[in-house]
Amino acid sequence: MDVRLSDGTVETVRLLGVDTPETSVTRASPEEWEGVPDTTGGRDWLVSNGNNATQYAKNRLAGQTVSIEFDPESDRRGYYDRLLVYLSQSATSEKSFNKRLLTNGYARYYESTFTQQDVYQSAEMNAREESIGVWNDTAQTTTPTDKTDADTDVIVADIHEDAEGNDNENLNDEYVTFENTGQEAVELTDWTVSDEATHEYEFPEFTLEAGASVTLYTGDGADTNSELYWGESGAVWNNGGDTVTLKHDSGETVDTYAY
């Protein structure tokens, strides 16, 4: 990604110790991802997760002020003259964005020389053991001939889990956004959204147009083509971390978003 430094110069940075899937089928490499089958389905799965990683980064970093740090054991620049860095969303953040990619299953550990090797390997193993993101065992084994109702271009695009003030008193400042990244409209009627606990929302009769997005607010309100309301009496999304799961009306998982 490109960053503008405090002196106004622009540099391309490479995040140390992590690698996300390629976003084109021809460049996808299942052999680099243990457990992902070397099939068309496996490559499609990696491309899908590569796009998820891109969206995750855009949602959190695009246009934001970030902090970058070099590692004393790593080269300062990589093969393509990119700066090799740890990137954090603030100077006081306890976890780098590099590590967040591993923790949330958007990336694998990328072997190189840097001080956090053991920590990053452990973060990847934890994500794999929990079947998070790209390491979701069920999704990995899906082949191209196993096309299901859940094969759509609707994704969980973003979540705002921490409402201003008391979450339970500001329910409509807690919301999750879904986006149709495809070229055709998708009917979401009877699809569900759930958290890691027992909360579940069922979509009313609703169609998400191609390229459009819809935001689901936790509280009350009048549904529109771009806004839906859960009608909950208390906060749903855990500020300390949770997983948004979007399911087709058949019960198949369409997308997950861990934060």
Image (spheres, rainbow, N blue to C red):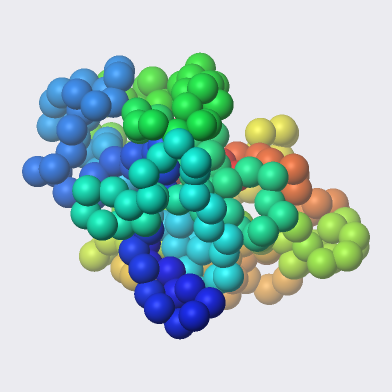
Out of 248 and 167, give the one closest to the viewer.
167
Q: How many labels does the image show?
A: 0
Q: Which residue occupies 75% across, 48% down?
A: 239
* Residue 115 visible here: yes
Residue 100 drawn at (x, y percent): 55, 42
User: In the image, is 6 to the left or to the right of 78?
Assistant: right
Which residue is the extreme one toward the left? 26
The quarter of the displayed image where residue 165 is located: bottom right
Answer whether residue 192 is visible to the viewer in this image: no
Residue 196: x and y in percent read 66, 34
- Locate residue 257, reporting x and y percent: 52, 44
Q: Identify the residue at image location x=13%, y=32%.
A: 40
Is residue 211 or residue 7 the one in the foreground? 7
2 shown above or below 36: below
Residue 110: x %, y % from top left:
35, 32
- Residue 33 relative to residue 136: left or right: left
Q: Which residue is drawn at 38% across and 20% down?
A: 137
Q: Residue at x 36, y 68 (%)?
A: 11
Image quarter of residue 103: top right
On screen, residue 207 above or below 235: below
Q: 60 above or below 130?
A: below
Establish if 141 lies above or below 44: above
